[in-house]
Amino acid sequence: MAQLWGGRFTGSINELAWDFNASITFDKRFLEVDVKGSKAHATMLAKQGIISEDEKDQIVKGLDSILEDVKAGKLEITTKYEDIHSFLEANLIDRIGDAGKKVHTGRSRNDQVALDMRLYARNEIEHTAELLKKTLEVLNGIMESNIDTYMPGFTHLQKAQPVTLAHHVGAYFEMFKRDLLRMKDIRNRMNYCPLGAGALAGTTYPLDREYTAELLDFYGPTLNSMDSVSDRDYLIEYLSALSTIMMHLSRFSEEIIIWNSNEYRFVTIDDAYSTGSSIMPQKKNPDIAELVRGKTGRVYGDLMSLLTTMKGIPLAYNKDMQEDKEAAFDAIDTVDNCLTLFTDMLRTLKFNKDNMEKSAMMGFTNATDAADYLVKKGLPFRDAHSVIGRLVLACIDKNCAIDDLSLEELKTFSDLFEEDIYDAISLKTCVEKRLTIGAPSSTSIEKVIKLNNDFLASFSIS
Ligand code: ARG
């Protein structure tokens, strides 16, 4: 056991208590950000004359050499140390001696870990944003090539009105676009540097917190030292946004699972993202989509875990907050994998356009437009609704579409029907007449695709 404290103790810690208290098994992920933070801190200390330039140089070199050795597998991060901060400080002192003992001047592990978590989260938020951008590019690509791929739009999972695949996929573009914008918002709100807050009450050293913040690419320092070491709001916001991403991925996965079913056959999932059955030779299962749906619960759980951990903590730092890490790491890793795999699955998904169109034809998705046709010929809407309702009932009986009936047959329901009914209720007309922005016509979708392209070209996280 190599600990940073001990002077005040006469006895030694219980072994189980040591393990229970330690965080090195998971906070070793902070290796790089901790080094980065310590280098900035030492640079600021030297600028302020709190340590010498030479000591700063030794610290920077020492930290870099530790990082290099860990990466090269020459130095192992072991459970001998309580956390990554102790590991780095102890190894630094081993390597450079007295100068290493000065790196923690004017700093506490409380503001150190607050900084590490922020630096780590900021990198991850940027990475999530990159992944989301790729998802959006794939979605917009599918939209571009499916402006006239007709399919049924559903409500209650019942065929409702015809739409196009571009329009359906465009709904997900909007969802993931909001997710991406949330990343930008969160980054913007959290991008302040807590270093210099000390344990909770700042320090008596003449630190230049603005300078440290600048060195680490923050907008500036945080403004209350007690809040600085206690705040995990940004992490809660991030996990909440990750939960929303999972909710969107899960809904889309559910649709892909349905579309891939033997009954629908709207899509064929590439072999690379399917698995077989150990007993049923015919099976090709959508496991990746199912797992993405399944892992949603896990990310919600991580968010709930963090919210619950934080809810009863008095100011300022309390050890409960060490529990923020595993929940955050799990949510971040899960979303990273899900977004990557889902986007690749989407990119290779084959859309069976004929089946989609046939399904729209056979599902009375043009019934509303048939009623509107009668309204345009002078019938009040409620009466038109009733005529078409009876017409649909007759078609169900004959197992045919409205368009399959002859004009004579149609006229037995209403003499307002004329030859132009067939064109009025074709899938193409139903879609193309919906011209308002946000509706499925090619005119509207082309405008949206252009806006999407502009958004993707101009988006920047910072
Ligand atoms: N491992 C700790 C954490 O993750 C670091 C901060 C320790 N601070 C303390 N006062 N014991 O929260």
Image (spheres, helix red, strand yellow):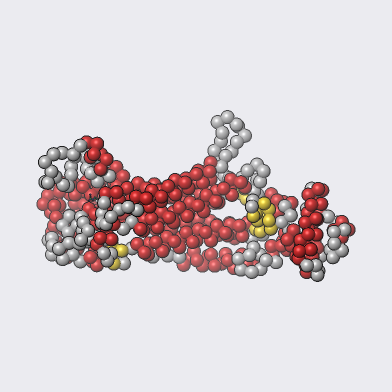
Front residue of this view, candidates 168 and 314: 314
Image coordinates of residue 173 in percent, x first then y, are: 54, 59
Is 177 on the left or on the right of 399, as rendered?
left
Quadrant for the C terminus, please. Answer: bottom left
Whether 448 is drawn above or below 338: the answer is: below
Image coordinates of residue 198 in percent, x first then y, are: 21, 58
Quadrant for the N terminus, please. Answer: top left
Q: How many marks?
A: 0
In this rendering, does residue 331 appear at all?
no
Residue shown at 52%/49% (left/top)?
250
Whether 108 is drawn above or below 290: the answer is: below
Front residue of this view, candidates 388 and 406: 388
Image coordinates of residue 364 in percent, x first then y, are: 74, 54
Residue shown at 50%/46% (left/top)?
292
Residue shown at 79%/65% (left/top)?
374
Is 408 on the left or on the right of 312, as rendered?
right
Instruction: Choose top left, top right, bottom left or bottom right for residue 269.
Output: top right
In this rendering, does residue 132 appear at all?
yes
Image coordinates of residue 7 in percent, x first then y, are: 11, 46
Instruction: Choose top left, top right, bottom left or bottom right for residue 405.
Output: bottom right
Residue shown at 80%/59% (left/top)?
387
Front residue of this view, candidates 406 and 416: 416
Front residue of this view, candidates 358 and 236: 236
Q: Check the image and name the residue furthest to the top.
A: 279
Is 216 on the left or on the right of 161, as rendered?
left
